[in-house]
Image (cartoon, rainbow, N blue to C red):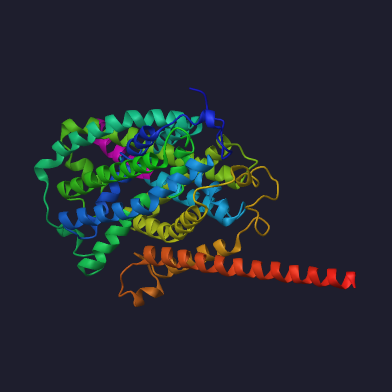
């Protein structure tokens, strides 16, 4: 299979040969991995029981999918990735906001997937062949996973799609075996080692789990969905079918692995750590399937995230090729794996990462969706590529390539989100107004969306006033000249 040559340029219709089934396959197959499974462990580690954990994940995933899925329709219309498409709202230079947000999201999830997958692999190999849990062992395993991930990401979309089709079937079978393997020790009560509710009460802790474990999954795809739907032709597949496929793929691709993570957390008594107890509680016969799940699943998911990172960096640095950009971000992501392993606990690192990125990513998604509704899905694909071609002008040029109202609205929403977030090591000052409950997701999206609408209305009014003043001045000069 040849290496993909496309970066963030417009995909010709003749090359847009994927369909809704491919979208479901890639969203399902790429997410059946430990990097997603581990999010199901967060609610039990927060001190919730089985039913509270399940409800928080389901509610968060459904709400997040409802917000995120429509973004898939944008790249269906523009034939390029979502960060480039957001130039219609933010300007052809202002869409760098989306590229940076997407880069950070994909970077964090890539590092997390390799980190958790590598830890489980070292643990399994320790039980199977006596591999010591030393720094060298972790370094070699992380390096091998990273190398395999780079290979898939550099070859591009077609290789990743083929890999996802295989993983959708293979990983489902491995997880089904896992349910049988861990079932004898499953319990529905809260894990005593968690030490009670993380935030002191049920509802604040449940809402934290809803955002950190449930909502964060779909939000991770706010800039990724366009990487896949840009290869689907709107001439052959309707928007409704693509939207339904996105809903189905995201829902199944996130709920199946996360609920497996919740199930195994209770079965393994994994309150303070996930990878270690998961391996220790595994029966001997499931060790090889667990090793396959940790390795193949991690490569599939991290490869997709790394592919997206390469596109985002390519969008930021148009002179760099997609392959060069992918190699660059792979090195950065691998470095993050080692930092996470040696200098942070999994629970604190994951919680902080997803809450911060949700706070700054949600207003960008809301603004982009408002713009999509306003233009009714009609975009100028050529004008979106102005920055990539190092040119100027076009209907999305706005002010020197930036749409100031959209950029300011995003900044306001992101700032409010950061001031309202509750992290293990930081609590925003706005928490006093919300009773200590983390509402950063709702507040950031609300402030960003409302600000964008108000600022664009005001900006339009100013433009009209200037146009009217210019017309009156021109008319006065004409009259004066005639007299």
Tell me which residue sits at (34%, 29%) in the image.
Answer: 165
Q: Is residue 142 above or below residue 437?
A: above
Quadrant (top left, top right, bottom left, bottom right) of the C terminus: bottom right
For the question of whether residue 323 can be seen, the reply is yes
Residue 408: x %, y % from top left: 55, 65
Residue at far left of view:
184
Q: Quadrant of residue 133?
A: top left
Q: Is residue 202 left or right of residue 144?
A: left
Residue 147: x %, y % from top left: 45, 33
Q: Is residue 341 above or below residue 321?
A: below
Is residue 163 or residue 383 the one in the foreground? 383
**Overall secondary structure of the magenta stretch?**
helix
Tell me which residue sits at (22%, 41%) in the image.
Answer: 279
Q: Is residue 87 above or below residue 184?
A: below
For the question of whether residue 131 can be seen, the reply is no
Residue 59: x %, y % from top left: 26, 55
Residue at far bottom of view:
432
Residue 247: x %, y % from top left: 33, 45
- Queried whether the magenta region covers residue 131, the answer comes back as yes
Q: Is residue 40 left or right of residue 109?
A: left
Tell me which residue sits at (60%, 66%) in the image.
Answer: 460
- Queried whether the magenta region covers residue 151, the answer comes back as no
Q: Which residues are magenta?
A: 113-132
Q: Quadrant of residue 160?
A: top left
């Amino acid at each position: 299979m040849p290496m993909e040559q496309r970066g963030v340029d417009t995909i010709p219709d003749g090359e847009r040969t994927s369909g809704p089934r491919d979208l479901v396959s890639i969203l399902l197959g790429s997410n059946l991995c430990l990097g997603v499974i581990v999010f199901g462990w967060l609610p039990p580690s927060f001190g919730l029981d089985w039913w509270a954990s399940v409800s928080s994940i389901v509610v968060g995933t459904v709400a997040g999918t409802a917000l995120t899925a429509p973004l898939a329709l944008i790249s269906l219309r523009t034939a390029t990735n979502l960060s480039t498409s957001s130039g219609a709202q933010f300007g052809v230079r202002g869409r760098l906001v989306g590229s940076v947000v997407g880069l950070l999201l994909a970077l964090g999830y890539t590092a997390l997937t390799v980190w958790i997958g590598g830890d489980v692999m070292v643990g399994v190999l320790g039980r199977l062949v006596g591999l010591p849990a030393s720094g060298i062992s972790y370094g070699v395993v992380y390096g091998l996973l990273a190398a395999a991930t780079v290979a898939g990401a550099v070859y591009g979309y077609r290789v990743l799609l083929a890999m996802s089709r295989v993983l959708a079937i293979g990983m489902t079978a491995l997880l089904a075996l896992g349910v049988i393997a861990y079932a004898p020790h499953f319990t529905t009560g809260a894990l005593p080692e968690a030490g009670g509710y993380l935030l002191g009460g049920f509802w604040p802790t449940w809402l934290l789990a809803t955002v950190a474990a449930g909502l964060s999954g779909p939000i991770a795809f706010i800039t990724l969905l366009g990487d896949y739907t840009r290869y689907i032709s709107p001439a052959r597949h309707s928007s409704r079918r693509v939207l339904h496929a996105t809903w189905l793929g995201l829902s199944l691709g996130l709920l199946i692995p996360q609920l497996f993570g919740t199930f195994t957390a209770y079965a393994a008594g994994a309150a303070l750590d996930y990878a270690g107890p998961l391996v220790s509680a595994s029966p001997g016969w499931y060790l090889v399937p667990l090793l396959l799940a940790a390795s193949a699943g991690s490569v599939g998911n991290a490869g997709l995230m790394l592919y997206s990172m390469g596109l985002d960096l390519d969008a930021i640095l148009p002179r760099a090729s997609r392959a060069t950009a992918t190699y660059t971000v792979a090195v950065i992501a691998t470095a993050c794996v080692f930092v996470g392993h040696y200098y942070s606990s999994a629970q604190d690192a994951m919680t902080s990462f997803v809450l911060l990125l949700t706070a700054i990513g949600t207003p960008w998604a809301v603004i982009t969706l408002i713009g999509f509704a306003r233009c009714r899905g009609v975009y100028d694909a050529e004008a979106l590529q102005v920055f990539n071609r190092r040119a100027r002008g076009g209907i999305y040029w706005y002010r020197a390539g930036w749409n100031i109202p959209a950029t300011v609205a995003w900044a306001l929403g992101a700032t409010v989100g950061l001031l309202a977030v509750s992290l293990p090591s930081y609590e925003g000052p706005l928490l006093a107004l919300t009773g200590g409950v983390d509402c950063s997701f709702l507040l950031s999206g609300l402030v960003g969306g409302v600000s964008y609408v108000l600022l664009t209305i005001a900006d339009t009014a100013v433009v009209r006033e200037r146009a009217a003043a210019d017309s009156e001045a021109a008319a006065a000069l004409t009259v004066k000249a005639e007299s």
